[in-house]
Image (tube, rainbow, N blue to C red):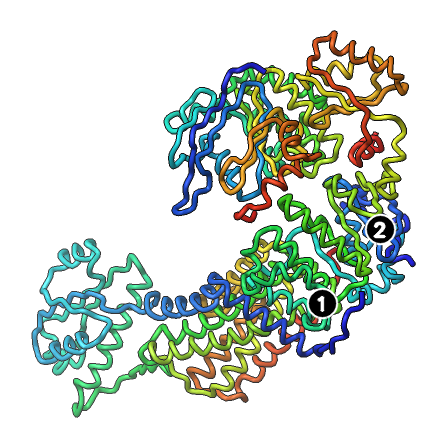
């Protein structure tokens, strides 16, 4: 059963001059943990706002839980949970007050659904009388998640829930999402963090309003067309220059501790040895070259080119 | 994983509305700036206008040159002295000396009684008193001269008790309703209008726009709750708080500034409620057109404060304005409110005399509310 | 990378009343190094950086930046460093050229120098056609590259980068790091503060601050092997798990 379906969805701004979302289509199955991965300005927030019926599309159609986003917006609004980009709860109300309020907003009560949010709320309970504005970034996100879940939505929309949150809280947040998935909620998460992509069942890579790829993370990695190598030397800047000027190298880019490169032709082991020798000859010391499995970020870069 | 079935207590629409209202009250009371604006400002304004800023002139230092020094002149000077407007300094100055006194600036008025004042009065049945004013500030000069004249006129009647006055046409000036020409009567109703208007428009618009700015509005929209209720629920606390504010202002002005309430208090509250509704609707309208708190504040202040000051009628008389501006003043709700309040508080007029103005106010409120509700955006754009 | 020390601190501390934001931090940074200053928000990174930039006076301890004393020569420090942050870099309503001239002027470049440098800068970035465009109209990636180039236009000894590439698409991020490598090659020390752990991988050495104290100082490779981690975020997780100060 399809929980969310987009069909050539379009959104333009500034009287059509800016195409923020350019004919995007994908499907999310019920109970799936789906990631929308892309940098700032890729169109993620616009897509979220259209799916939660806050914005009307300029082209294409979409359904959430089988309901049309234009015509059935009222029904959709009572079925979904939404966490927009920045902290969108009331900073001057306490944790408890916020939660109670949002429960009432959705015609339910905290008591009725306590079990559902227990895992998350237990971490917040010691702070329940504290003003929400005074919580740490990670705690705020957890509270926002509770408020989005309190009415047991069919679909959960989380727009960049971990941006600006410290790494420890990020990890905890994704653990929570894993728990939620087991309860059968469909979750659509957007994030600019490529490493979070591997935590999703299925991902859509998006850049400049266009989809680059939609598949499971493993499948996308498998689709990487050629072998990928990582190279390291004492002076990385010089190494990068030498790599780019090497005739056999197709593409070379920095990747932190190692540079990642692809060759015009997949090299034999002899050719690799020769390659290392070439680089050492040019003065690159402590050279290390190894074959690696691509990450989602590598795939993203490949698809962007 | 099977979750236990717990009986659901589903709130009704009304309960939810009340939950919203309670939330709004919490926001108001937890934000010191809002509280200051809501309560501090009106009280400050009333006190300012009531006491400090007044176009009455009190305790003005004047010089009296009494060349007659007889029974009549002394009686008149006694009266002048008793008035709160003047502080008498007796000195028989020459014309030049009077001028130097004016130039120094401390003294603004001089009264000269000629040597044969009483004799002339009795024998010639006419005498003159010279009043010299420093008219470099014509308003002050005029006012002071008027005060002096009034007091002298009043003395005249007393002086000639029992003596047959010659046939003369005497003008009697009576200041109805406000014989002491108290400025407070003018200002307090005006400030009431200003305060209610400003506070309601500003508070409502900023409160709604704040939700848009912080992003909570997004979350509220994606819920089954009718978004119009969101907006209306904000009006309720400010309505109630404004009524409390109004009561505080009324108490202050009657107790501390001797403002009368000659008419029905119920009518006052009715008119105030209508003005508040109009102001709230205006606030909602402003919040519809902008997403920025700064813009909302600017629109509320500039859009409301300036017209209210100019066209309510308590600072500048509307009758003196050119016709086009007089017509413009008709769309300023506080103008009608001001008329009602003055009529009720000072003149004691009942509903028969103010129903037209009340109807206009009610009409304005209704029209604005309708426009606001029609224009309310159920989406972000 | 030579052994010329450009930043050296000794027990540098900043207190706000009872609260010790930065607690006796001691480290050295070499010329041409790409040095990562990591930690969660609230760990004391920003406070430390403000002191090093000459913007805030330490409560105790010593430090010398680009050879200048942190207490007595803050103005000289400011003239010899560059700064760029994600939150603010350039004026959106000025053109590219106007921004270059403005910031170059602040750093004391003469008109002649400005002319030469701006031409060089624009040609390196390939932005010659965009010199008259408003910065606000450029895509984020271009803005950041321009901002970085402007931050080093006066060839400072050290440039401080505050979370330079968070949220930016992977290609633009690479182009940005190309610029950083180029600058490091020419001898400029790059001081990067961030809480994005994957940026840490690009650094020669990193320190990690937790609760105001430096918990680690080494190359990413050595830290990863020490904590048996495959990425810097795992290292961070190990070090920060027990942190008492939660971010805000």
Callouts 1 and 2 close, C-beta under 8 Å:
no
Q: Which residue is mark 2?
A: A58
Q: Residues within 10 Å of mark 1 (few under 14, many from 20)?
A: some
Q: Secondary structure beneath disc 1?
A: helix
Which quarter of the image is occupied by the C terminus of chain B? bottom right
From this view, report whether residue C118 is shown above or below residue B282.
above
Q: Which mark is residue A115?
A: 1
Return the x and y of residue B371 as percentages of the image width and height.
70, 68
Which quarter of the image is occupied by the N terminus of chain B? bottom right
Chain under label 2?
A
- The image quarter in which residue C159 lies: top right
Return the x and y of residue A283 as percentages of the image width and height.
70, 9
State whether discs 1 and 2 lie on one chain: yes
Identify which residue, B272 or A288, lies in the foreground. A288
- For image coordinates 19% across by 91% down, the residue present is B164
State which mark lies toward you, 1 or 2.
1
From this view, report whether residue C124 is shown above or below residue B26.
above
Q: Residues within 10 Å of mark 2 (few under 14, many from 20)?
A: some
Q: Is residue B313 left or right of residue C205?
A: left
Identify which residue, A30 or C94, lies in the foreground. A30
Return the x and y of residue A159 as percentages of the image width and height.
73, 51
Q: Is residue B315 left or right of residue A238?
A: left
Between the C-alphas of marks 1 and 2, the distance is: 40 Å
Q: Secondary structure beneath disc 2?
A: loop
Identify which residue, B375 or A241, lies in the foreground. A241
Residue B278 appears in view: no
From this view, report whether residue C46 is shown above or below residue A264.
below
Chain under label 1?
A
Residue B333 appears in view: yes
In the rendered structure, which disc, 1 or 2, sits on the residue that comes first in sequence? 2
């Amino acid at each position: 059963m399809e929980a969310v379906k987009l069909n050539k969805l379009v959104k333009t701004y500034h009287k059509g001059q800016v195409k923020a979302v350019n004919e995007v289509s994908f499907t999310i199955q019920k109970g799936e943990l789906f990631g929308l991965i892309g940098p700032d300005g890729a169109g993620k927030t616009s897509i979220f706002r259209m799916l939660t019926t806050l914005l009307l599309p300029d082209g294409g159609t979409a359904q959430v839980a089988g309901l049309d986003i234009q015509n059935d917006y009222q029904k959709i609004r009572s079925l979904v949970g939404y966490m927009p980009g920045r902290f969108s709860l009331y900073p001057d109300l306490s944790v408890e007050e916020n939660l109670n309020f949002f429960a009432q907003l959705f015609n339910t009560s905290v008591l009725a659904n306590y079990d559902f949010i227990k895992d998350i709320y237990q971490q917040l309970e010691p702070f329940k009388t504290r003003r929400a504005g005074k919580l740490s970034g990670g705690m705020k996100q957890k509270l926002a998640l509770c408020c989005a879940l309190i009415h047991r939505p069919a679909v959960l929309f989380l727009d960049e829930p971990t941006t600006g949150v410290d790494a420890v809280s990020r990890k905890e947040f994704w653990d929570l999402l894993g728990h939620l998935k087991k309860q059968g909620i469909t979750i659509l998460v957007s994030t600019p963090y490529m490493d979070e992509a591997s935590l999703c069942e299925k991902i859509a890579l998006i850049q400049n309003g266009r989809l680059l790829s939609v598949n499971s993370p493993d499948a996308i990695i498998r689709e990487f067309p050629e072998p990928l190598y990582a190279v390291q030397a004492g002076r990385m800047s010089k190494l990068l220059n030498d790599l780019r000027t090497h005739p056999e190298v197709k593409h070379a880019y920095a990747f932190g501790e190692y540079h990642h490169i692809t060759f015009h032709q997949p090299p034999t082991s002899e050719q690799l040895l020769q390659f290392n020798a070439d680089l050492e000859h040019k003065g690159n010391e402590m050279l290390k070259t190894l074959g690696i499995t691509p990450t989602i970020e590598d795939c993203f870069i490949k698809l962007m080119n | 994983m099977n979750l236990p079935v717990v009986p659901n207590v589903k709130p009704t629409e009304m309960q939810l509305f009340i939950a919203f209202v309670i939330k709004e009250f919490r926001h108001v009371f937890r934000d010191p700036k809002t509280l200051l604006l809501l309560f501090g400002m009106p009280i400050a304004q009333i006190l300012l206008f009531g006491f400090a800023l007044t176009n009455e002139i009190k305790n003005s230092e004047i010089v009296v040159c009494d060349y007659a020094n007889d029974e009549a002149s002394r009686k008149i000077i006694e009266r002048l002295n008793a008035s709160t407007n003047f502080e008498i300094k007796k000195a028989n100055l020459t014309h030049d000396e009077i001028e130097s006194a004016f130039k120094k600036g401390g003294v603004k008025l001089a009264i000269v009684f000629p040597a044969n004042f009483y004799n002339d009065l009795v024998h010639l049945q006419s005498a003159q008193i010279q009043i010299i004013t420093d008219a470099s500030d014509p308003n002050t000069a005029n006012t002071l001269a008027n005060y002096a004249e009034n007091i002298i006129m009043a003395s005249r009647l007393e002086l000639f008790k029992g003596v047959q006055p010659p046939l003369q046409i005497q003008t009697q000036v009576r200041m109805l309703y406000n014989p002491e020409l108290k400025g407070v009567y003018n200002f307090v109703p005006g400030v009431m209008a200003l305060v209610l208007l400003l506070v309601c428009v500003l508070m409502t618009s900023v409160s709604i726009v704040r939700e848009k700015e912080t992003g909570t509005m997004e979350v509220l929209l994606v819920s089954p709750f009718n978004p119009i209720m969101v907006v209306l629920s904000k009006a309720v606390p400010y309505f109630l708080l404004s009524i409390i504010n109004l009561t505080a202002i009324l108490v202050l002005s009657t107790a501390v500034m001797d403002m009368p309430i000659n008419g029905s208090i119920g009518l006052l509250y009715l008119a105030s409620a209508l003005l508040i509704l109009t102001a709230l609707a205006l606030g909602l309208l402003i919040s519809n057109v902008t997403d920025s708190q700064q813009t909302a504040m600017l629109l509320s202040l500039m859009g409301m404060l300036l017209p209210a000051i100019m066209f309510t009628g308590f600072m500048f008389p509307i009758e003196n304005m050119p016709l086009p501006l007089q017509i413009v003043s008709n769309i300023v709700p506080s103008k009608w409110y001001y008329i009602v309040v003055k009529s009720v508080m000072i003149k004691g007029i009942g509903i028969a005399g103010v129903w037209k103005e009340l109807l206009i106010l009610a009409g304005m409120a209704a029209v604005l509310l309708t426009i606001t509700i029609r224009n309310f955006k159920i989406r972000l754009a | 990378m030579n052994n010329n020390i450009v930043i050296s601190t000794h027990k540098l501390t900043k207190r706000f009343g009872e609260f010790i934001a930065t607690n006796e931090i001691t480290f050295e940074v070499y010329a041409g190094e790409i040095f990562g200053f990591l930690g969660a928000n609230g760990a004391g990174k920003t406070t430390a950086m403000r002191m090093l930039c000459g913007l805030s006076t330490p409560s105790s301890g010593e430090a010398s930046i680009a050879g200048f004393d942190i207490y007595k020569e803050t103005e000289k420090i400011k003239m010899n460093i560059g700064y760029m942050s994600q939150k603010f870099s350039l004026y959106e309503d000025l053109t590219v050229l106007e921004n270059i001239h403005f910031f170059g002027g602040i750093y004391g470049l003469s008109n002649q120098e400005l002319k030469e440098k701006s031409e060089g800068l624009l040609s390196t970035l390939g932005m010659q056609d965009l010199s008259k465009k408003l910065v606000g109209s450029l895509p984020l990636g271009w803005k950041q590259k321009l901002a970085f180039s402007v931050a080093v236009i006066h060839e400072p000894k050290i440039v401080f980068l505050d979370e330079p590439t968070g949220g930016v698409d992977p290609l633009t991020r690479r182009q940005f790091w190309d610029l950083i490598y180029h600058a490091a090659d020419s001898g400029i020390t790059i001081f990067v503060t961030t809480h994005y752990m994957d940026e840490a991988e690009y650094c020669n050495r990193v320190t990690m601050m937790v609760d105001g104290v430096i918990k680690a100082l080494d190359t990413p490779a050595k830290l990863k092997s020490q904590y048996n981690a495959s990425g810097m975020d795992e290292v961070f997780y190990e070090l920060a798990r027990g942190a008492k100060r939660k971010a805000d």
